[in-house]
Image: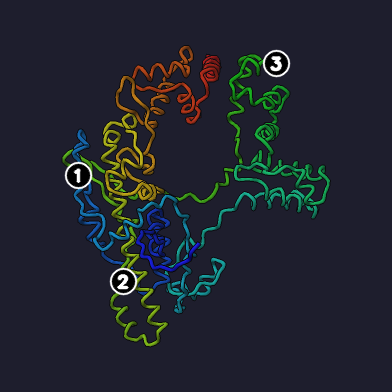
Amino acid sequence: MRFSQRLELRQGQSLVMTPQLLQAIKLLQFSSLELINYVEAELERNPLLERADEPPTAIDADRGEAGFEASAGDPGEAGVRSGDWLHTDMETDRGAMEGGLGTDLGNVFPDDRAATPGESKAPQEGLGLSSASWSGVGGSPRDGDEDVSLESYVAAQLSMQDMLGEQLSVATTDPAERLIGTTLIDLIDEAGYLSEPLGPVAERLGVALERVEAVLAIIHTFEPSGIGARNLAECLAIQLREADRLDPAMAQLVGHLELLARRDFAGLKRICGVDDEDLAEMVAEIRRLDPKPGLRFGGSPIQPVVPDVYVRAGSDGGWVVELNSDVLPRVLVNQTYLATVSKAARAEPEKSYITDCLQTANWLTRSLEQRARTILKVATEIVRQQDGFLVQGVEHLRPLNLRTVADAIGMHESTVSRVTSNKYVATPRGVFEMKYFFTAAIAGTRGGDAHSAESVRHRIKQMIDGESAEDVLSDDAIVQKLREAGIDIARRTVAKYREGLRIPSSVERRREKTALAMARA
């Protein structure tokens, strides 16, 4: 073997994930609320950024409005009046961003911006109160001359744990029982059920299981009725017991809820020892109970759905697609402040800091513009593809996938996936998430056009909603009707769609409709 040295020159391509590229990717998948929070944090950190008072004409005037015009009857003739989706100086970044990034990155959010207290402490006019004494009404000192918000004085809503804790302090004075009760209350989930068996709780607290069960029995007397139950049967039994309706027949019905779920009314009549009329009354009473008493307290805060794109009918019979300018943060670089601080900077760390801030600010402004243009581009193509849905309804929703949209607009599938994540479009038929329009294809019979899975689900639901007690459709009958309508579908697919819609089987539906008919008679 002989060793030697030589010099070789190799050329290759590789993708470098720079911080700026990561920022652009994150901005694409942010929802409107997440984007606003992100921009607010950047405005707080970067002194060169400021809010733009006037809307940027490049997006709103030229491209944001009337971005799509197409004939409702011929979506293939649609055209986009807006210009190119990126500036020429961003083509390199676009290619890198779309070059095989198949894995979505998790959202990373900075801390919320803290309010900056002011220094003015002028007294409130006409009230004879200083700022300090006026803020004391709300229970906390308040500095600054900002307008007083009434929201600051609204009492906070008690959580479920707080409400149960107050009832526990009244129900028992024993410190050990209060400790056990507090532990059990903390284990109650959002629906109002105990989320852990009592055995491990007793072992962890070092007390007898019987004592934990006794404290749980106390919690079962709290409001709302049924709170702290370990299962649905116990939850319903607690509510019936408090209403003095837990007789032996009702206890048997609660103990055999699986038969009620299967609509096996014949078996329930035999077990409970009642006739049809009594059973119908018992079932009606069960349905009036609350299966999830904890939800009365409300869950986590509900985030409002804000459309990112509006779609409206055009004057020529086509569709107009426009961005929602209210949810687009507008920022720009303060050139006046940049010139001032650049002249004052002497040391190298100061110059480096200003350079980094300027680079970050430029990238953020360009990334926001790129994000807006990309959303408009994708939304326009979705509207062009789903013209039939907008005109005629869900039955005419076309099968669509990410590759179809990506090929049509010249982007990568991963980019389209990020754009459609947590984005909503307001149409004449309602507000929908962009991902709603991407559905699987169901083949047509005799080589006909394919049908979207969502439209097939809608057809199945319509068939079942229109059936009577004498003519309940089985899955095989639904398959036959769909094939007559030109939809080639398997029986197991119909069963999967039916279960996804939470529709019981034909046997259970027949039992339920028969019982309802007898109860009405």
Q: Quadrant of residue 21?
A: bottom left
Label 1, on which residue? 79
> Distance of mark 3 from mark 1, alpha carbons?
70 Å
- In this picture the colour scheme is rainbow
Who comes first in sequence, dot 2 or dot 3?
3
Q: Whole-percent x and y of residue 68?
A: 22, 45
The answer to whether 233 appears left or right of 67 in the picture is right
Residue 276 position within the rendered picture, expressed as x and y whole percent measured from the top left: 61, 14
Separation of marks 2 and 3 at Cα, in angstroms: 80 Å
Q: Which residue is mark 3?
A: 273
Q: Nearer the viewer, residue 15 or 371?
A: 15
The crowding category of the residue bearing disc 3, from other C-alpha atoms within 10 Å (few below 14, some 14 to 19, many at least 20), is few
> 30 or 390: which is nearer to us?
30
| Alpha carbons under labels 1 and 2: distance apart | 34 Å
Tag 2: residue type? Val
Mark 2, residues whose alpha carbon is within 10 Å: few (<14), some, or many (≥20)?
many
**Dot 3 amino acid type:** Gly
Q: Is residue 299 above or below residue 442?
A: below
Within-10-Å neighbours for mark 1: few <14, some 14–19, many 20+: some
**Where 239 falls versus 110 (above or below)?**
above
**Residues tagged 2 and 3 counted as in contact (Cβ below 8 A):** no
* Residue under pointer 2: 333
Helix, strand or loop at mark 2: strand
Left or right of 196? Residue 320 is: left
Q: Nearer the viewer, residue 280 or 450?
A: 450
Q: From what the image shows, is residue 515 above or below residue 92?
A: above
Residue contact at pointers 1 and 2, CB within 8 angstroms: no
Q: Earlier in the sequence, mark 3 or mark 1?
A: 1
Q: Residue at x 43, y 66 (%)?
A: 41
**Residue 495: numbered disc:** none
Direction left: furthest residue: 316
Q: Which one is in front, 179 or 394?
A: 394
